[in-house]
Amino acid sequence: MFGNARSAISAYQKVGVDAAIEVADPHRLILLLFAGAQAAIGNARAAMQQQRIAAKGEAISKAIDIIGNGLKVSLDLEKGGEIAERLNALYDYMILRLLKANLNNDAKALEEVANLLEEIHDAWRRIAPHTAQQAVA
């Protein structure tokens, strides 16, 4: 009985995320990637505390995937100049720290990456397209 309820909840949540992605502009998609990476790191932290090794590994792998195949790939290194290059290097650093966190059960490495992501996420929130349009007007 509960298995079906969990499946229904999971499906509902997935539909909600899928719907958000379908209607999101590029700026909103980046915000969703940051939120997803942060959620995965939070899940990894909880799994690490509960000594659930497989769940920890899956959550860290998800965070790495979001950072490497989402945030990093979205960078335009030609047009983005120095900022894009620095973000590219920072994303590489985050991936290495997450790998270390997974191998060594290093909660401090998880926290470091979570803090770095939050700083960039916060900056990204502040440069919302509507904010730029309001500044011009």
Image (spheres, rainbow, N blue to C red):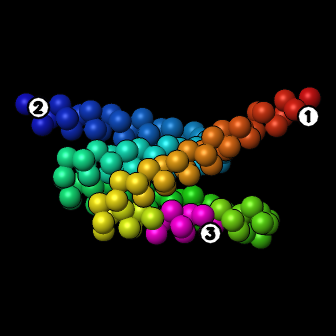
Disc 2 versus disc 1: distance between alpha carbons? 53 Å
Q: Mark 3 or mark 1, which is nearer to you? A: 3
Which residue is under mark 1? 136
Residue 120 locus on image (x, y percent):
62, 48
Identify the mark nearer the N-term, 2 or 1: 2
Pointer 1: residues within 10 angstroms few (<14), some, or many (20+)? few
Residue 90 locus on image (x, y percent):
60, 64
* Residue 25 seen anywhere in this rendered image of the structure: no
Please identify the dominant SS of the magenta region: helix
Pointer 2: residues within 10 angstroms few (<14), some, or many (20+)? few
Tell which of 67 and 24 is nearer to you: 67
Q: As displayed, is residue 40 above or below residue 11?
A: below
Residue lying at 84% horizontally and 29% vertically, measured from the top left: 134
Q: Indicate which disc residue 89 carries.
A: 3
Residue lying at 33% horizontally and 34% vertically, measured from the top left: 12
Res. 78 image quadrant: bottom right
> Mark 2: which amino acid?
Phe
Report helix, strand or loop for mark 3.
helix
Q: Is residue 109 magenta?
A: no
* Residue 123 seen anywhere in this rendered image of the structure: yes
- The magenta stretch is 88-96
Q: Indicate which disc residue 44 carries.
A: none
Residue 32 locus on image (x, y percent):
53, 44
Which residue is under mark 2? 2
Res. 124 image quadrant: top right
Q: Residue furthest left?
A: 1
> Mark 3: which amino acid?
Ala
Cβ–Cβ under 8 Å for marks 3 and 1: no
